[in-house]
Image: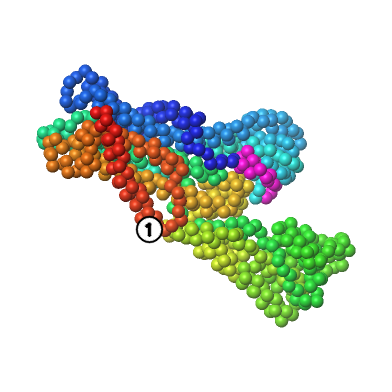
Amino acid sequence: MSTPQSSIFTGPLVGSALKESFVKLDPRAMIKNPVMFTVEIGTAVMLVVTVLSAFVDDPSLGTFGYNSAIAIVLLLTLLFANFAEAIAEARGKAQANTLRATRRDTTARKLTGDGAQEQSVSSAELGKGDLFLCEAGDTIPADGQIVEGLASIDEAAITGESAPVIREADTDRDSVIGGTQVLSDRIVVRVTADPGGSFLDKMIGLVEGANRQKTPNEIALTILLSSFTLIFLIVTVTLQPFAAYANAPISIAALISLFVCLIPTTIGGLLSAIGIAGMDRALRANIIAKSGKAVETAGDIDTLLLDKTGTITIGNREATAFYALEEDKLAEFNQLALISSLSDNTPEGKSIVALARKQGAAESPRLTEGAAFIKFSADTRMSGIDLADGRQVRKGAWDAIKRWGVRSAEADKRYLEERVSEIAGNGGTPLALAVDHEILGIIQLEDIIKPGISERFERLRKMGVKTVMVTGDNPLTAKFIAAQAGVDDFIAEAKPEDKMQYIREEQQLGKLVAMMGDGTNDAPGLAQADVGVAMNSGTQAAKEAANMVDLDSDPTKLIEVVEIGKQLLITRGNVTTFSIANDVAKYFAIVPALFVVAIPGLDALNIMRLGSPDSAILSAVIFNALIIPFLIPLALRGVKYRPVGAASLLIRNLLIYGLGGIIVPFIGIKGIDLIVNLFL
């Protein structure tokens, strides 16, 4: 699904959000946000006071005009807070509508009985475990797993990627998504989700926010803000008897204004919008987060497990050189390397064939006719070919070929072992080639480090994130590549259980771990990790175990996930700092206004030299309302992320949002007061 950046305030989104802002005034919805719920109660009280002041002449009630102004501003405060949340939700709903447009009822070719009979049914009638057939031109009716065949599939409607992908049975790329289209060949698919539970349905639910729950940090911050609100409520209520004792009567409007200005309404009004926007930013990076907690946790990650291939290096290893034991037999070595790799469909095998041909080797039908190809085995760690003339050609890992090459002289083995150590020491992968148990030479495979990857790791290091490279290479090769790439640690000759063990060890030290995977063997690690990102091209098991799915299937996306999570946490922290800091200016505006008549000495606190007590209170309340819509773009776009250390980040943010949160309200309230005094 392509999600390009778009303007925050487009006409349809704003219209929808404005309507929703009024709907959210329902107390049953507002009570979920304790801070804004108390503002709503204060607004309701002010509306009653305003009506009473129109008919009752009581100094404690204030004037009708002034009360009306305060009530309107408080109502706007609620609407602005609701608008912030509604505009964030509206963006998600707009994306959900785009997704929903790709989901339509299609005809499925359901296979019945033993799979020999075909029946046309609606896609809505397919249940988990059913089999269906798809051929070129068909739309895949439901999520499933290919059990027979392979096909080229267009997934642009989901991923936004125009290039087709290959899906094949009995591989790690055997899952298909309902709504995508088969471009070629024929596949038989087993349905893996009941109607309403497909990948697309889950995406729509997540995007719309219907399944969004508050994250642990949000809950903790809500409790903190509620505590502040309770404290200021007690302060405001107890202020009235003190004022009466000091012979400084305070109107109800003034008390409610003081309460609303002192509680953290700014962060209270923007908290939900910041959380929704965090998931929205992940989605715009083509990452489906199954919960806001996953995005938030990504920002606190301590350790990052990254596969070498595709993440740190470009694709797969390639053959770059042949080293024959006897230089005058290099041509024969090249030809044997070629024919031993003809049936090797791995990228490495294909690169050996390409290099051999480039160096002049050619296929010889005389040699390969009647030959038997030997597939690679994890037990023998070798592959090769048994030629018709009786010769046995084997290619594989050095240790395996060394054991197999029993006819080679020990001196030759020592000489070749030096070459093997040299290749491995330079980050390459050595393969050996032998004929009839005699080693003929070494094939060099090399990894190419992705440009700029070391700089990205340095950025992560500045954030305090430890990077760990996971590879199947031997320790010597892994150490060289790790040093070149700039990672902090590596796991060599890694098996799935090694990843699990490393994750558990890090977690036992109190660290949060993230990893990415695509295969069924990655599922345990993805489930164990605090943040598990599965590739969309991977197996169903991997996607179910992970708490995020990358629609682009980009191995480097894990780094971006961490940055998105940190941006969410930084944005929330900065807005909270600003919200609490700007209470200082409101204090200097309202408190002198309340008591300056009874206690003239408090006029010294009126450092903004506001026009009158009434204008001071009204100006503070207006600023308190207006600051929310001014901060909506920041809440939705997020604070610009900078890869710096925690100490530097804290100092910078305290200066901008802490000191700025003190200075801006002084300027804003003074400016509003100058305008208000024109009408009072």
How many numbered callouts? 1
Q: Is residue 185 left or right of residue 630?
A: right
Where does the image place residue 45, in percent across and percent down from the top left?
A: 26, 27
Tell me where residue 380 sits by quadrant.
Answer: bottom right
The residue drawn where x is 46% and y is 31% is 14
In magenta, the rendered stretch is 155-171
Where does the image place residue 289, in percent across and percent down from the top left?
A: 51, 44
Where does the image place residue 405, in percent across and percent down from the top left?
A: 74, 73
The residue drawn where x is 23% and y is 19% is 54
Tell me where residue 648 sits by quadrant.
Answer: bottom left
For residue 584, above or below residue 430 = above
Q: Is residue 303 left or right of residue 50?
A: right
The residue drawn where x is 70% and y is 66% is 320
Tell me where residue 38 sits by quadrant.
Answer: top left
Q: Is residue 69 visible?
A: yes
Point out the residue furthest to the front here.
Answer: 678
Q: Which residue is mark 1?
A: 647
